[in-house]
Amino acid sequence: MKIVVTVKQVPDTNAEKVFDSTTNRLNRTSIENVLNPFDEYAIEEALKIKEGAGDGSTVTVLTMAPESGREVIRKALAMGADDAAILSDPAFQGSDAMATSYALAQALKHIGFDLILAGTQSTDAICCAIPAALAEHLGVSCLTYARKVTVAGGEVEIQRDIEGGYARVTAPLPAVVSVVKGINEPRYPSLKGIMGAKKKSIEVLSAAAVGAEAGRVGDAGSFTRVQGWAAAPAREKGRVIKAADPGEGAKAIVDFLIAKKVI
Amino acid sequence: MDFDLTAEQLDVVSMCREFAESEIAPNAERWDAQSEFPLETIKKLGELGLLGLPFPEKYGGSGADTLTYALAVMEIGRCDASVGITMAAHVSLGAMPFYLFGSEEQKERFLVPLARGEKLWAFGLTEPQAGSDAGATKTRAELRDDRWTINGTKCFITNAGTPISGGVTITAVTGEGDGRRPEISNLIVPQATAGYVQAKPYKKMGWRASDTRELTFENAAVPEDHLLGPRGRGLKQFLDILDGGRISVGALSVGLAQACFDAAARYAKERHQFGQPISKFQAIKFSLVDMATELELARSAVLKAAWLKDNGRDFATAAAMAKLYSGELSRRCANAAVQIHGGYGFMDEYAVSRYWRDCKINEIGEGTNEIQRMVIARQLGL
Ligand SMILES: Cc1cc2nc3c(=O)[nH]c(=O)nc-3n(C[C@H](O)[C@H](O)[C@H](O)COP(=O)(O)OP(=O)(O)OC[C@H]3O[C@@H](n4cnc5c(N)ncnc54)[C@H](O)[C@@H]3O)c2cc1C
């Protein structure tokens, strides 16, 4: 079975983000890029499925990124993925979720797959759209928010996270599955993994190589436009409730929470 | 000159940082307070390949270089000096003698499980009467009926009695020598040897989560093939090991000094007095600047020594200088970090109080400051 994990490089979650006021794009050069933390769960799940199957299944990592995306790819390879592909082409610049999913789908057709695993979202854009959009482009089933994944007999079964429990969902392969944070505990890349990663192949794919049409990627292929941006408003000062009687204090807190619809 | 780290070195740094920050740092205070040896965490270091980092893959190691090893020790030591020394003592004092001086058979038998991190190994040089004067060893080993029978005491031995300690390699007097100096050899003493007596762990000021014990050998007999390297070369071999060990204590010191700087810089920006963050006061600012500047120098010195070793150059002087400078720097940084914390720095809840206790050993272990100066003076022809 060929498992492909789609991953994204994102700005370090703790870094202060700055937007370019002319392009309305995030300035990525000044901040450290990391592997999208949600994708680490997808990689770990893919490795577990591969190791569990023990049948020569492989894990390929796919990302759309500038050449600097190699760094995050290296981490995935060091964790144990077999090989990787980077979709890298100036034509992809400015792609939104739809354009990105199209390009990724083209790449997936190019490299082949039985099972596609993805994180539910990225920490920078948080659209949560890619898994479903990929499945749509590829014409395969989409199983989202998996908190458990089992593959057997050409079928994938997941426990889909829903409020208060889970739904059991199955689909025939090939399929796209997005996994939730906490489905597993992503491993640290071992020293051997890190040292071995440089021997693994990273295929660089251009728009032409995967047959992506110019009008469907980049700015031209994007359905959405960032119109403007603003810094998040500073958090308001907390309110201190002073009460002589603890009962009254508790009641004031409960009233406040009810008014805020928290409880 | 190329100061860029390779892709692998950068990746090892991020892995170690991530691991240390999530698995070690949150527990460091508790391990220290309870003098608890963090067995599970040490095993994880082994699984990640960190306990066999600089040894070739064919001996169960990870095949990385000394520079990568120094970077890894810095990152681990930054979060917990005790875990740092457990790793460093195991790699550069415990396992390294097998790699450098062991026969192929000894490497297979002893080095492989150590490099894989299945067992820890100790280095027994120091004795109650032989500290800086390591050649004054009193421990004796006599070859009788194809066995070395060992009698003596080693003190302050790191990793001597953890649940996964496999044994110790020691220096022992094995003959009369040239009349002026006795013949000293290295012997491999597995923990299971009858007559291998490990004392209770010492109660220590710092490095409290690391295992340090006295070992006594009471007619402890090991097979003749447990001689490591040629007979009579024991002291020289151990002094060579210490040259390399100084790179790791230097790295450990840099890690600790970095932790001191990070904590002090963070606190100085948060703490307000006289209506502003104390970081705005020139005295505090300059103190932080001095730390950062000296840290840069210390890190460069340690990495240079590692680079020299990796490139087969003479590195003994560079390693002694790096160890001396970084060790003293870690003490200066710990002192400054506590000072910047004021009274809070004197409290156990603040990590800097632990750093202050942990830093001192960097000026004593693997050769005191005075001994480093003597080593350097000799190299300078003084
Ligand atoms: C926590 C810990 C872990 C350790 N782990 C190990 C280990 O794993 N294996 C091991 O073999 N040892 C280990 N040691 C021992 C350590 O290496 C020695 O403590 C150190 O070498 C100093 O020896 P000493 O304590 O006997 O001091 P001494 O040699 O008695 O020194 C006392 C003082 O005299 C000074 N001095 C001595 N000679 C001279 C001189 N010629 N000129 C000027 N000054 C001099 C010293 O610098 C020092 O200031 C460890 C020690 C500690 C505290």
Image (cartoon, coloured by chain):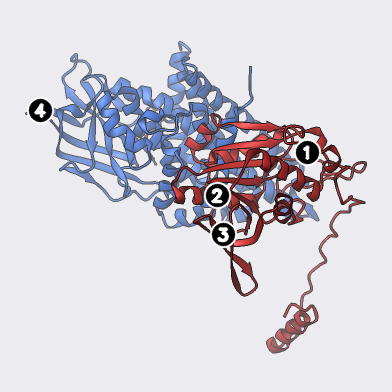
Closer to the N terminus: mark 2 or mark 3?
2
Residue for point 28% across, 41% down: B166
- Gap in Å between the C-alphas at discs 4 and 2? 55 Å
Residue carrying label 2: A46
Comparing B64 with A58, the one in front is: A58
Judged by depth in the image, the label closer to the viewer, 1 or 3, is 1
Judged by depth in the image, the label closer to the viewer, 4 or 3, is 3
Chain letter for the residue marked with disc 3 in the picture? A
Chain letter for the residue marked with disc 4 in the picture? B
Residue B49 percent location from the top left of the image: 44, 38
Residue A167 percent location from the top left of the image: 60, 70
- Gap in Å between the C-alphas at discs 2 and 1? 27 Å
Do discs 4 and 2 belong to a common subunit? no
Q: Is mark 1 within 8 Å of ligand 1?
A: no
| Three-letter residue code for mark 3 | Ile
Q: Which chain is blue?
A: B
Do discs 1 and 3 belong to a common subunit? yes
Residue for point 43% across, 36% down: B88
Comparing A98 with B205, the one in front is: A98
Where residue B146 is drawn, which disc sits there? 4
